[in-house]
Image (cartoon, rainbow, N blue to C red):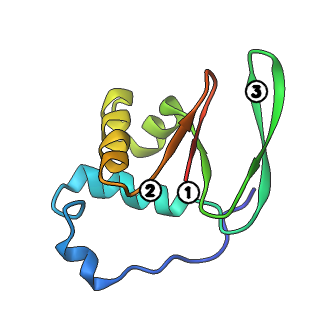
């Protein structure tokens, strides 16, 4: 699915706890840019074969290894920052054995 559309930042973001931590800010903005802006379907290769997943606006399918490559960070660092964003109630993570859905 091609990335289309735009996102909007508020200057108030400069005052946020997320902005004060450069790696956390990097992961947060990556999440904002990855989130779908319209309903769509994603095909994933899983142990059972090919799986079709419906992705709603504001969601994206997350895998640690892919995220680590895109962010140029260790997998453990990416996951810790995702959990931090979840604890700050910036996002929600729903996981199964093959992928996580981020909202």
Among numbered discs 2 and 3, the one appearing first in the sequence = 2
Rendered position, 86 above or below 97 = below
Residue underneath mark 2: 30
Residue wearing tag 1: 34
Task: Using the rendered view, name the quadrant where residue 49 is placed.
Answer: top right
**Residue at image mark 3:** 45
Q: CA distance from mark 1 to mark 3?
A: 19 Å
Residue 73 seen in the figure: no
Q: Residue at x 51, y 76 (%)?
A: 7
- Give the CA separation, mark 2 to mark 1: 6 Å
Among all residues in the image, which is located at the extreme top?
Answer: 47
Residue 16, given in percent of the width and then of the height, sits at: 21, 69
76 in relation to 34, above or below: above
Would residue 31 appear left or right of 12 to someone viewing this image?
right
Q: How busy is the neighbourhood of tag 2: few (under 14 within 10 Å), some, or many (20 plus)?
A: some
Q: Is residue 42 above or below residue 73?
A: below
Q: Report, in whole angstroms, how far the alpha carbon at label 2 lies from the one at label 3.
A: 23 Å
Q: Contact, CB < 8 Å: mark 2 with mark 1?
A: yes
Circle 3: element type: strand
State left or right for residue 27 relative to residue 69: left
Q: Quadrant of residue 34?
A: bottom right
- Residue at coordinates 34% horizontally, 30% vertically from top-left? 74
Residue 68, label in figure? none
Quarter that holds the N terminus:
bottom right
């Amino acid at each position: 699915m091609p990335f289309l559309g735009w996102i909007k930042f508020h200057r108030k973001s400069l005052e946020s706890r997320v902005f004060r931590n450069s790696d956390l800010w990097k992961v947060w903005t990556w999440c904002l840019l990855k989130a779908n802006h319209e309903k769509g379907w994603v095909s994933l290769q899983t142990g059972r074969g090919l799986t079709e997943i419906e992705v709603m606006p504001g969601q994206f399918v997350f895998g640690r290894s892919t995220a680590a490559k895109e962010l140029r960070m260790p997998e453990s660092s990416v996951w810790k920052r995702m959990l931090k964003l979840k604890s700050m109630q910036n996002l929600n993570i729903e996981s199964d054995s093959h992928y996580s859905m981020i909202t």
